[in-house]
Image (cartoon, rainbow, N blue to C red):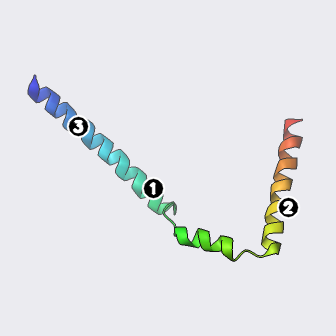
């Protein structure tokens, strides 16, 4: 009885470990762990043109979603 529980815990632990390892590998390959400092520095060095482009893009997205819902 006790051995069966220990084996089950070992199997479940190994499966969960491989799942977590798979997520870490996926994150590294897709750039999920990119440089966080780069993101914060980007906010400091944005020009007004960049901000206006972002606002225009957001407005176009909103208009497209409204048209899609109609």
Of the two numbered discs 3 and 2 on the same chain, state the one appearing first in sequence.
Answer: 3
For the point 25% across and 40% down, the residue is 13
Q: Quadrant of residue 60?
A: bottom right
**What residue is disc 1 on?**
26
**Helix, strand or loop at disc 1?**
helix
Quadrant occupied by the N terminus = top left
Q: Is 61 displayed left or right of 44 in the figure?
A: right
**What residue is disc 3 on?**
11
For the point 89% across and 42% down, the residue is 67
Point out the frontmost of discs 3 and 2. Answer: 2
**Helix, strand or loop at disc 3?**
helix
- Seen in the picture, residue 16 relative to 28 is either above or below; the reply is above
CA gap, disc 1 to disc 2? 33 Å
For the point 67% across and 74% down, the residue is 44
Of the two numbered discs 3 and 1 on the same chain, state the one appearing first in sequence.
Answer: 3
CA gap, disc 3 to disc 2? 53 Å
Q: Which mark is residue 56?
A: 2
Q: Residues within 10 Å of mark 3 (few under 14, many from 20)?
A: few
63 or 26: nearer the viewer: 63
Q: Position of residue 31 (x, y in %)?
A: 51, 63
Q: Is 40 displayed left or right of 59 in the figure?
A: left
Q: Residues within 10 Å of mark 2 (few under 14, many from 20)?
A: few
Q: Position of residue 37 (x, y in %)?
A: 54, 71
**Helix, strand or loop at disc 2?**
helix
Quadrant occupied by the C terminus = top right
């Amino acid at each position: 009885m006790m051995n069966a529980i220990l084996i089950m815990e070992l199997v479940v632990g190994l499966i969960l470990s491989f799942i977590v390892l798979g997520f870490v590998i996926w994150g590294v390959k897709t750039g999920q762990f990119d440089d966080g400092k780069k993101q914060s520095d980007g906010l400091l060095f944005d020009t007004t043109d960049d901000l206006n482009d972002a606002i225009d893009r957001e407005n176009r997205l909103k208009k497209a979603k409204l048209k899609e819902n109609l």
